[in-house]
Image: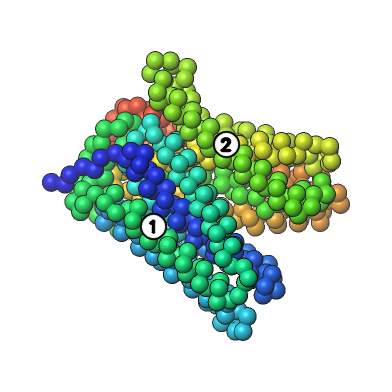
Amino acid sequence: MSRVAAPFGWLSVARMGLVQAALGAVVVLTTSTLNRVMVVELALPALLPGILVALHYLVQVARPRMGYGSDVGGRRTPWIVGGMVVLALGGVCAALSTVAMETHRSAGILGAVLSFMVIGLGVSASGTSLLVMLAKRVPEARRAGAATMVWVMMIAGFAITAGVAGHWLDPYSPSRLVLVTAVVCGLAVLLTVVALHGLEGPVGTADASCAGNATATPEPAPQAKPTFREALTQVWAEPVARRFTIFVFVSMLAYSAQDLILEPFAGQVFAYTPGESTQLSGVQHGGVLLGMLLVAAAGAVAARWGARHPALAALGSLRGWTIGGCVASAVALLGLTGAGLAGEGWWLKANVFVLGVANGAFSIGAIGSMMRLASEGRHAREGVRMGLWGAAQAIAFGVGGLLGTGASDLARWLIADSGTAYSTVFGFEACMFALSAVLAWQLGRPAAVARSAAAHSHPRPERSGVGDTLVVQVHTRG
């Protein structure tokens, strides 16, 4: 009989955050630094790294398959470590391919294409299983704080890697690029192995499903292991999982579509210099961080005093923060629509900061909801469920960048005034965030969950968390 693993405390969450930081360190080096080398040092078209980054997102449609593999095996650590090794190999090969482009352009580009596909596979295997482990081992009361801690540590991984690697890359040389990339990738694998050592528990230890409280309860063993196609079909047939997949795609499409056009908008409409537009991006990221911390603090207040003060319990509603963040993001984007029409004189920095705060709050609310919903439905499908949502997010990010830039180019071609053209695009993105808020609201309707329960199992009424409207968890064998 397998033992049941204990729920994660804050130290365990921090160790998972170190893994996410390591993952982010490799990704930022391959998607940002190599991007710059291709465009600046090698004078290649900017379209090339754009296609490579989009390709690494496209490959992440494999996330459900990776999640299925960890479901069948019952353990997540081998998939996280294995995925990190694959990611590191892809990162080193990408650096080698970039260097090769200088003398053997066609071979280098082919190598880069293959390398970025490997990077996408590594991210899929490691990232999906990491989220599943968090979802199954973090109690409900800690999920907002856990999501914030892990994502803040990932952002810290971005920043530290960019700063340290940037220092050691000067003066630039091809051999130095490969050496720095190899060191970062090697350290990422080492940090992952050390952080995960003994964390999941010995072989034979079952995951603890922490849905609603800190008391872990063992899952019933599945009667038969379905094929991947059967498991994916079963998950897609669950109304809640299917609706949440659509929500993730639409919301992340809106989130990513704004990213690549904000700085060009500031430059063309508000005459910002490159330095000023970069600072504007920093203002937005500062707002995102504040929004994340705000949700984490609200969750802590609700967990501590919500039982005695019902008014404070609502602060812990991940669904409420998700909906509110989407609505606030839509309002902020409408503000940017007005900025495009008004031009100079608009409080652009304040507007962008509010957009960042709204995006940060929405992100943590959505990630926390994802962690909670991963265990709602058929047992032993958490990896497939998380993989499906991860694939939807990756595709949305890949499409969002192309959609945002393409829409702005088309609008500026059709509309002579740049401000009006950008306003049209921001208005469209605001509509997508408004639609996301509607989809998030529909996810919490009891009737929707009841239909899912009726279709897939015998429902068991149960509280799903402080302030959340989803009140039924679905449990099915097999």
142 vs 458, left or right, is right
Identity of the residue drawn at 46% across and 52% down: 21
Give the residue displayed 45% in from the left and 45% down from the top. Answer: 150
> What residue does disc 2 label?
290
Sequence-first tag of 1 and 2: 1
Q: Quadrant of residue 288?
A: top right
Q: How far across and how far down the image is residue 172, in percent?
A: 62, 72
- Asked whether 163 or 289 is in front, the reply is 163
The amino acid type of the residue labelled 1 equals Leu
Q: Is residue 320 visible?
A: yes
The residue at the point 26 percent across, 32 percent down is 215
Residue 133: x percent and y percent?
A: 34, 47
Is residue 229 in sight in this rendering? Answer: no
Q: Dot 2 surroundings within 10 Å: few (below 14), some, or many (20 or more)?
A: many
> Of circles 1 and 2, which is in front?
1
- Rendered location of residue 317, percent (x, y): 46, 28
Residue 478 vertical placement versus 32 (above, below): above
Q: Which residue is mark 1?
A: 191
Q: Tag 1's secondary structure?
A: helix
Q: Residue furthest left?
A: 1
Instruction: Identify whether 189 is placed above or below 155.
Output: below
Tell me: residue 390, above or below residue 290: below
SS for tag 2?
Answer: helix
123 relative to 352, above or below: below
Question: Disc 2 residue type?
Answer: Leu
How many marks the image carries: the answer is: 2
